[in-house]
Amino acid sequence: MFSGDDISTEFLPREQKQEHSSERDIEDKFLDKAAKVFYCSLQKLQCDFKETQQGPAKHSVEAAQSFLEYCCFQALAQLTQDSNFLHDSDFRHFTFDFMVAWETPLANDEDNKVECKKTPANDEAEEDVSLFFSDLMPFLVEVENTVGVEAFARIAPCIPIIADAICVYPQFETLTASTSGRLPFPVYDKYIEALETSLCNMKKKNERSFLKELPMSEEEHVMEIDGTSQMVIQHIGSKSLTGRLTLTDHCLYFEPSSLVSHKDAIKYDLSLPIDHRVSTELAGPWGSRMFDKAINYQTTSPEQRIVFEFPELLGSRRRDYWLAIIQEVIDAQKIIRKYKLESTCKIEALARSALGIVRLQATREMQLLIASPGALLTFNLAQNMLRGGDHVLEALLSTFENATSEETSQGMKINSTCLVQKSFRDALESFKVWKTVQSQQPLFYAVKHGEPTLLEVAVKEARESSKYLHNAKEKEEEVKFDGIGTNITLLKELLQPVRAVLSWIRTLLSWNKPLHTMIAFILVAILILRQDNCIVVSILQPSRS
């Protein structure tokens, strides 16, 4: 953002000259707001930005976006210092306005090219300079009240609580499902409010008194608790127990209900190096398979099969939610073992998983239709990518390894070579969801203005390579009838008593058990004789009368 005195109108087209005076008023208001955040003059910010420019000159649109990102990252570093920044309405407006401004040069790029062709080229050097300033003008003016996917994908992941670079695209698609792929401010504002609520709820869950009775280690953090207001039923064979279910970033705990409180918890360690599998399952009373509202949890060593049922009147959203978050913890632990993550990298992976669950909870809080809850979770999505998931995980591992300490990050800020964002662990600690460990130094991720991160590049490549496979899979699903498999299974369960009677009759006719067959024949003969006697009596009674 440059001051109004620095912008020359000499080389602007006639249409822009007419609009220049009205844009100046809006520009001054915006610059006043920006100055309060930057705590420095805009001239100094402009000089600092020019010092960071290296290599050949960028295209005017790229230069405009690069300068905007420079201002944006500087402002975010100031705005996110307060632990209650999500509650601040100024923060919500600033971040949304930055996203609107970021995509404005792109939206006007084609129009600017047409205007350039109509403008006489007397002095190419001066024209390039004036066009650069004219490209900066649109994002000083709020010409759009909605945000596109690319702007959201670039700005939102710089705030770990709002979005993750891996699952930012499905998150945006879910938020804009009812707004034609554009994010308006009311939806964004409601999403931030729901995030704040979800963070507070997760903090309260980690402070529940009954957690002291669970065999939890000090490094475990609670992700979700169920069974307090709604019923959770555990099925092992034909035995069923109601109780309370607790999910941490390492384990799953089930506490069977008793008359007064709960019995000792049953622990299922999801961090063990064995094969953990969760899938949808049908469940019902006395071992029947009637209702599609359960999760099947299986392990290979020791071999066991447990079913958790989540009863609800309509649909199976509660079951789908629990299936997604349990799978997320399993995938996170699997990646930690696969890449042998330790210490800081391991904590960052678990924190990334926890914030993904927070965002999923916030999306459910907004009562939005979630087609696939797992697509909003970091490791769940990375593991289920049709193509390119391994490259995304490798880029994520490189991001973990390149996390910088506080001293290095301060040096980066002074040199202005790149800016930084807080780690996911620090984000959870700043909201007091996780306890702060004094021995651990704050972590930062380097983000260069005007350049995508390695993780962003990997995610975009994976999305492009998976697009054709997704289209083929969708066409294949169109041929199938929705829910036909579940309906057939339910019909089989309802016909189970008839099948049992037919099987019993077949056994009698086979004479495998002669005693049972003889007894059955005698009983049938007695019934027939009694029925014949009743018929004879009914015939003789009228004749006697």
Image (cartoon, rainbow, N blue to C red):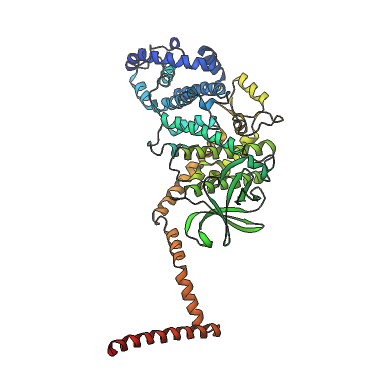
Q: Compared to 449, does 180 lie above or below?
A: below
Q: Is residue 318 visible?
A: yes
Q: Compared to 447, does 170 lie above or below?
A: below
- Residue 364 x/y as whole percent: 47, 40
| Residue depicted at 43% across the width and 14% down the height | 29
Q: Is residue 147 visible?
A: no
- Residue 286 x/y as whole percent: 53, 62
Q: Compared to 407, does 381 lie above or below?
A: below
Q: Quadrant of residue 20?
A: top left
- Residue 401 x/y as whole percent: 65, 35
Q: Is residue 147 left or right of residue 418?
A: left
Q: Residue furthest top?
A: 5
Q: Residue furthest front?
A: 545
Q: Nearer the viewer, residue 521 or 84?
A: 521
Q: Nearer the viewer, residue 115 or 308?
A: 308
Q: Quadrant of residue 79?
A: top right
Q: How many marks?
A: 0
- Residue 199 x/y as whole percent: 55, 34
Q: Residue furthest right?
A: 439
Quarter holding the C terminus is bottom left
| Residue depicted at 47% across the width and 55% down the height | 292
